[in-house]
Amino acid sequence: MAGGLEGAGEKKEPMVKEAPRFGSRIRALRRREGLSQARMAERLRISPSYLNLIEHNQRPMSALVLLRLAQEFQLDLKVFAGGEDERLVADLLEVFGDSIFDRLGLTPADVRDQVAHSQLVSRALLNLYHAYQAARSSAEVLSERLSEGQELKGIEISRLPSEEVSDLIQRQMNYFPDLEEGAERLWSEARLEGKDLFQALVEYLERAQGVRVRIEKVGSMRGAVRRFDPGRRELLLSEVLRRGSRNFQLAHQVGLLTLPDILDRLASDPHLVSDAARSLCRVAMANYFAAAVLMPYERFLKAAQEERYDIDLLGHRFRTSFEQVCHRLTTLRRPRADGVPFHLVRVDIAGNISKRFSASGIRIARFSGACPLWNVHAAFLTPGMIRVQLSQMPDGTTYFDVARTLHQERGGYHAPRTVHAIDIGCPTQFAGELVYSAGMDLSNLAAAVPVGVTCRLCERTRCEQRAFPAIQSPLRVDENIRGVSFYASTSVE
């Protein structure tokens, strides 16, 4: 057979780092393609016995075989990146942090072994826990309604659509080249350079799409800030929108009208299992496109680097909000033209996480409350002010974070005022590129705040903020001793 049989005495090829993790993925691919080991080995020009060893993580896979795999099966090599395994391990660690698993005595090593052995089974466990949580939440709602004598209607027990979309964004590392190209095309076709962006987009919509734009009073918008009538080809924008927000909503509508095929393709991701998730994905992707229009990639990246990622200054320059700038900073992941790898989280005053993304490697809680020592929670104590934090995770990794509250006003005096806090951060080795680190001694780890993912996963048993016992340390209660926190250790070590 041309090229010989690898694994049967042929010349050794350079080995790919983290290759032992590839076994379950190769096996899953082979089964999906309906191939026997012999047939797949033939296509990869290796011996069946060597393929069997690879599938069982007993032999590494060479770079040459990996390239053949990509060519034969039109496979994106990104699926073999180690980051996906690490995210899956992190998610399962949080799942097994639930008290229902306490008696099993599972360790992080057990979880990593499971992910290495089978990604499919690991994902199935994750999906099962999602369903369990949804069912538990539905049961609580049902119980509350019964106790209050309310009429019972259908209760949804599926996974939240927002979770599905967040996972898709994380898998793509929040970078969507087709949407970036679409935004660049719009700048050329609409001749946006050197023009007032609002007026230029209004003219483009009327000229290219036959859509008229009108600013409408709050009362006529019936609670909406943007309302498009496809039949009348009319786009209404609320008078409460500031200039930057008006531009964003215009660009969002342009994306919906001009990129339907791209949005449909992105929303057809097999991991989006509900119609609601697919619809939400289209909205999220149109938002991504709008941000790319308002903050063109190359120009924005250059400005961010020159101004040392000063969020307020970038907002003024591109006529965008603090939150929009933070979101855009997380999308600067273009190969060979990337920015600082940021993570981002947004919480409300009750601690609910409504947005999350991590390119920095930090783990963000999915199933339980985030660490109360995290900077994002303290931002509510100083509304509107920038807060910075040097933090250290239990594994020793350190991060630099910037947090601030956000206020959204939707109308006049009687309209509700929504308050969130947003946190954007990066590994400490990149913090020197941020204006917010000026004057800070980033090497002084004694000044770092000890932060964890969640109480259940954090190994710091003496933390005074602890709200639950750690899974690594069984709860021991001594009725004669009371610590500052009930769950913080009071033992003498």
Image: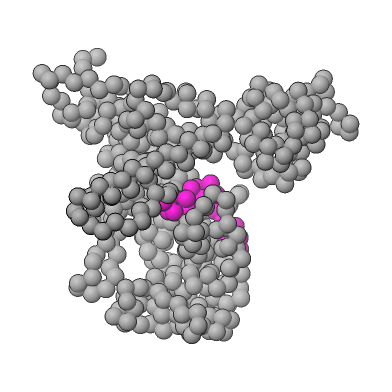
Residue 429 in sight in this render: no
Residue 177 left/right relative to 202: right
Does the magenta stretch mainly form a helix, a strand or a loop?
A: helix
* Foreground pick, 430 / 57: 57
Q: Which residue is located at x 72 percent, y 46 percent?
A: 74
User: Quick check: 183 above or below 70?
Assistant: below
User: Quick check: 127 above or below 382?
Assistant: above
Q: Which residue is located at x 22 percent, y 22 percent?
A: 489
Q: Quadrant of the C terminus?
A: top left
Residue 192 left/right relative to 444: right
Q: Residue furthest right?
A: 1
Magenta stretch contains residue 56: no
Q: How is the image coloured?
A: one colour
User: Quick check: 475 above or below 177?
Assistant: above
Q: Quadrant of the N terminus?
A: top right
Q: Quadrant of residue 264?
A: bottom right
Residue 201 in sight in this render: yes
Q: Which span is picked out in magenta?
A: 160-181
* Foreground pick, 31 / 236: 31
* Foreground pick, 450 / 366: 366
Residue 208 in the image: x percent, y percent? 58, 81
Residue 14 in the image: x percent, y percent? 72, 28
Magenta stretch contains residue 177: yes
Q: Which residue is located at x 43 percent, y 48 percent?
A: 159
